[in-house]
Amino acid sequence: MKDYLKLLILVGLATPILVFADAGTALKTDTVRAEPFADAKTVGNINKNDSVDILNKKGAWLQIKTKKTSGWVRLLSVKRGAATVSNNAKGVIDVASGRAGTGQVVSTTGIRGLSAEDLKAAKFNEDEMKKMESHTLSASDGQSFASAGGLNTVKLAYLKGAK
Amino acid sequence: MTKLLISLILASGLFATQTMAYDFGKVLEDAAKKKIEDVKNGGETPATATVPDKATSPAPESGTSSATTSAATAAPPPAQPEFNWKNPSKEEEIALGREITGSLLGAAPLVKDEALQKYVNQVGRWVANQSERADLPWKFGVIESTDINAFAAPGGYVLITKGLYQKLHSEAQLAGVLGHEIAHVVKKHQLKVLQKQQLLGYGAGKLSGLFGKNDKLAKKALGTGAEISARGLDKDAEFEADRMGMVLATRAGYDAYGLADVLQTIGQTNKSDSSVALLFKTHPAPDERLARLGDSVGGSLDNIKAGKTLENRLYKLN
């Protein structure tokens, strides 16, 4: 009973962290600009792990606000979600959502995961393989599908790995 | 009653997986050793095989490692057409991929929805067309699993779980995910792992006959096939597949950030959630992947015309 109370209190504490849907965290140091363009005026910068509020998205840019500055940064410099929730709180959330002890989830709903063990024990299934093969499309099938969706190819070289 | 029993068995299986998470490397090593023993038990002389942790590729013929030596002294290979591990043909690559994918399908069958399967093949085929291996007979499928994951096998086989598919909000995101898997095939990431393993652990000659009548030995040596998918690739292969996948989807006319969107979503999934257990074990953290992708992209997409997201064309699952 005591534990149950403790759990409720902890859940209460943990919840506010999760309600800010537009909270973000800087993944690295980057320039904050006045407009969503690479050559727009610099208005400040963000550092790795800074908390940011995500206000808007435009193309490859996010409009953000931090304690120190506000403006636009590149989309890939910010991750959605607040900085790491502590392990304790995470565990509590798991209990509260019925995720702790994965067995529960399996036994109540009959859903199936795909663990390393499952893969190791797997046996070749010829029927399913044949089914998969029956859906094989040609290059021109792909082209027709793209045209139907108004997709046009773009010339772009592969990217180099960052140092 | 039967249902309950099955649930219990499944539950215990999952529990075992969780415990394993703490020493995954050891488990893999054991699995590799076991496989070698399996092969040896198939009529070979017993030997003390050691699996090197970091596989550096020695010249296959030189027989420098103890494993290779013991393999060389074992019974002579049966007289069958040999599987060319050093330089597999396209057909051999496809045969290998079929073996692996068929096993994956044994663990989780295709979702029984013809329209869905056709749709992922359409998107996948179009993205694959943008790669330098458009000649492969690309095959895509959505499998019945609540896990969040996707798999690729040599020769152009790509599977995505229903759990991951249900996290998607647009066709561009699907294209990004498939692009990542297509990149693994194009760069032969899985094939290289298998080659290394075969050349080091078993000796190339022992895997003859993948196409022969007695292909049992080859099958045994491959393990269950799907096992390779549980092992994961090195981090750099994953980062490379992210970069290439993003470019392939962009070339196909999609919004360049579909894959990044999905990585954001995965990053928000609770790390202790069992649905991402295998994914997180076999891939670098989503944050790291996003940051690396950002470093590589820099301003290189600034002059690319914005691609399409096609939210409305994403096939909705019932």
Image (tube, coloured by chain):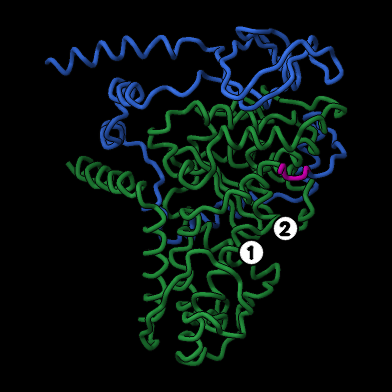
Q: Which chain is green?
A: B
Residue at the (62%, 85%) spot, across then down: B61
Q: Earlier in the sequence, mark 1 or mark 2?
A: 1
User: Marks 1 and 2, how far apart in space?
Assistant: 9 Å
* Number of the label disc, if any, that sits on residue B94: 1
Is there CB contact under 8 Å for labels 1 and 2? yes
Snapshot quadrant of residue A155: top right
Disc 2, SS: loop
Magenta stretch, residue numbers: A159-163
Q: Is residue B76 above or below residue B3?
A: below
For this rendering, which residue is in front, B218 or B54? B54
What's under tag 1, amino acid-wise? Ile
Magenta stretch, main secondary structure, is: loop
Residue at the (44%, 14%) spot, across then down: A18
Q: Residue A3, position in %: x, y?
A: 16, 18
Q: Quadrant of the C terminus of chain A?
A: top right
- Decide: few, some or many residues near mark 1? Use Cα within 10 Å; few <14, some 14-19, many ≥20: many
Q: Identify the chain of the residue marked 2, using the numbered disc in the image.
A: B
Residue at the (76%, 10%) spot, across then down: A43
**Residue for badge 2:** B136
What's under tag 2, amino acid-wise? Leu
Q: Is B96 one of the magenta-colored residues?
A: no
Snapshot quadrant of residue A14: top left
Q: Residue A139, position in %: x, y?
A: 78, 49
Residue at the (50%, 92%) spot, across then down: B76
Q: Which chain is blue?
A: A
Q: Is residue B43 above or below residue B121?
A: below
* Number of the label disc, if any, that sits on residue B65: none
